[in-house]
Image (cartoon, helix red, strand yellow):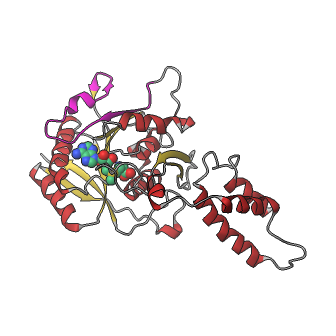
Amino acid sequence: MVQSQIYRYMFTTSGIFGFYLPPANYQRRVLKQLTRRIEGAIRDPDEDDISGPLMEKMAHLSTLEDPSPLETAEAKSVLTYILPSTTETVLPNAVFIEECPSLVASGGNTGLRTWAACLHLATYLATEAKHLVLGKSVLELGAGRGLLSIICAGPLSAAYVLATDGDRHVHETITRNVNLNPHLARKPGRQNPLDARVLEWDSSAPLGSLLPSKGGNVLYDTILGADITYDPDSLEPLASTLSGLAELCPTANIVIAATIRNVDTFDIFLAHCLEQGLSVYDIDFRCPPFELQEGLFHSLDPPIRIVRIKKEG
Ligand SMILES: C[S@@+](CC[C@H](N)C(=O)[O-])C[C@H]1O[C@@H](n2cnc3c(N)ncnc32)[C@H](O)[C@@H]1O
């Protein structure tokens, strides 16, 4: 019974999370560990054994050749991200994203995979700060593959989300990922809940043109960014863009999640914020360690800071 559930849920496309199975070499690694554990639990070898379907799957996976390290790095897969559920709600919780999970950067583009800061910020929003998104207009900077924006527009029920990135393919990337998530399909007669546009951080960025129209006024309630403070060269234009947005949307909550790989780099960001009249406050979010997480699994090493940014005066 347990073995047939393992087979069905984890190794067939009819399982609950199995619309998109992980790459074959990953499935093989997982199945090897599982079969070892099942074998260890067998009390009576005459009665119990590894089930036929699991054996067949293992035999099939073993015949496949391993991809080269380069093929592994460049391989695109559809990853299934499960949101943690909270005591008061169980969110519609699977989000599918096509990405290159092993690729740090290609051609200077770091947005080809989803980063831990994105998973951390999404965990914060889904567990402690749903009010920042529910029914709100949300703008994301440096959206990469779009997971955070898609979670906001889908499970967290934002009224509208604009995902932006400096990468000129952002629209097609995010549209492709939106199409993998049927729960995001546009409802008849409703505004498309998620758009994507190019926004390169720059003091001359045309921020006004990003604003959605909302009852005659234009404003975002929440401005988000995950892992966008890593490149010393882009910190000044980023702070300037944040300052421009804070002026256009004076009541917006600006929340950034920063992976602290290098304290000096983050200090440079803080200094540029100060120059722009922006104050930066840490949000005290105690995310459980990896082994106790219930979804959006991510490492907290290097540490991730979530900060709120406000324009003073
Ligand atoms: C490390 S990735 C993070 C992607 C996503 N937020 C995540 O956490 O998975 C940084 C993103 O910022 C974007 N980016 C970097 N420099 C930028 C700039 N000057 N203007 C706009 N976007 C930029 C990159 O294209 C990339 O998608």
Residue 91 seen in render = yes
- Judge from the rendering whether residue 127 lies leftward or rightward of residue 197; answer left or right: right
- Judge from the rendering whether residue 35 lies leftward or rightward of residue 301; answer left or right: right
Instruction: Judge whether residue 209 is colored magenta.
Output: yes
**Residue located 56% across and 36% down the image:** 183
Image coordinates for residue 86, horizontal then vertical, percent: 54, 55
Residue ranking furthest to the right: 46
Above or below, 206 against 280 in this view is above
Image coordinates for residue 301, horizontal then vertical, percent: 38, 69
> Which quadrant holds the N terminus?
bottom right
Instruction: Judge whether residue 85 is colored magenta.
Output: no
Q: Quadrant of residue 149?
A: top left
Above or below, 274 against 292 in this view is above
**Residue located 51% across and 64% down the image:** 293
Above or below, 45 against 256 in this view is below
Image coordinates for residue 170, horizontal then vertical, percent: 36, 37
Residue ranking furthest to the left: 275
Residue 226 seen in render = no
Image coordinates for residue 48, horizontal then vertical, percent: 85, 72
Q: Nearer the viewer, residue 273 or 24?
A: 24
Q: Please state the extent of the stretch shown in magenta in the rendering.
A: 191-217
- Judge from the rendering whether residue 252 lies leftward or rightward of residue 61; answer left or right: left
